[in-house]
Image (spheres, grey):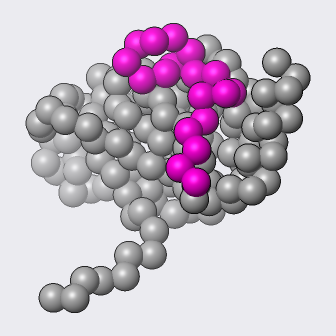
């Protein structure tokens, strides 16, 4: 097999203590919306919420319970540079914790990967999240301006 051409992230499975509360957090922080409940999930006795973007694209399922294994289960969400800057400008924010319980995520915590910028944070249930943009040049300029103001 020569490999396939993946076009974008389709969806992720995240494990949470309270799917309803988690859906509210994902709505407030990332603008995701709850989709209609799947009959197949209910038939299997699973308490879960399907989440979608504002355009209706399914991107995550929030399952009640613990993840099936240990390890880093980062879910990365791609955004345009202007949305990345809006997110960063709102930091620190009481809803957005840095990974590892080190306090709130800060504007300057963006990681420069030279091709993309990312913010790494955790949801209230400890799932690792990443907000990524490939609009590198305008975000680099914006971050430099933020650094000069600090």
The one of 60 and 19 positioned closer to us in this rendering: 60
| Residue 3 found in image quarter | bottom left
Q: Position of residue 45 (x, y in %)?
A: 15, 41
Give the position of the N terminus as an image quadrant.
bottom left
The one of 92 and 20 positioned closer to us in this rendering: 92
The one of 3 and 26 positioned closer to us in this rendering: 3
Does residue 37 appear in this view?
no
> In the rendered view, does 82 fall on the left or right side of 60?
right
Residue at 69 percent of width and 27 percent of height: 107
> In the rendered view, does 86 fall on the left or right side of 93?
right
The part of the chain drawn in magenta is 97-114
Number of numbered labels in the structure image: 0
Whether 104 is among the magenta residues is yes
Give the position of the C terminus as an image quadrant.
top right
Residue at 62 percent of width and 59 percent of height: 134
Q: Position of residue 106 (x, y in %)?
A: 64, 22
Q: Is residue 10 above or below residue 52?
A: below
The one of 130 and 31 positioned closer to us in this rendering: 130
> In the rendered view, does 7 fall on the left or right side of 16?
right
């Amino acid at each position: 097999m020569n490999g396939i051409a993946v076009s974008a992230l389709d969806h992720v499975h995240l494990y949470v203590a309270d799917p309803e509360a988690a859906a509210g957090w994902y709505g407030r922080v990332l603008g995701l919306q709850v989709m209609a409940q799947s009959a197949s999930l209910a038939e299997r006795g699973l308490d879960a919420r399907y989440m979608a973007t504002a355009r209706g694209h399914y991107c995550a399922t929030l399952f009640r319970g613990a993840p099936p294994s240990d390890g880093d289960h980062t879910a990365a969400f791609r955004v345009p540079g202007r949305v990345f800057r809006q997110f960063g400008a709102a930091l620190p924010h009481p809803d957005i914790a840095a990974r590892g319980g080190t306090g709130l995520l800060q504007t300057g915590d963006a990681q420069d990967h030279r091709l993309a910028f990312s913010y790494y944070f955790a949801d209230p249930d400890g799932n690792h999240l990443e907000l990524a943009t490939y609009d590198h040049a305008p975000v680099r300029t914006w971050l430099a301006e933020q650094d000069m103001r600090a």
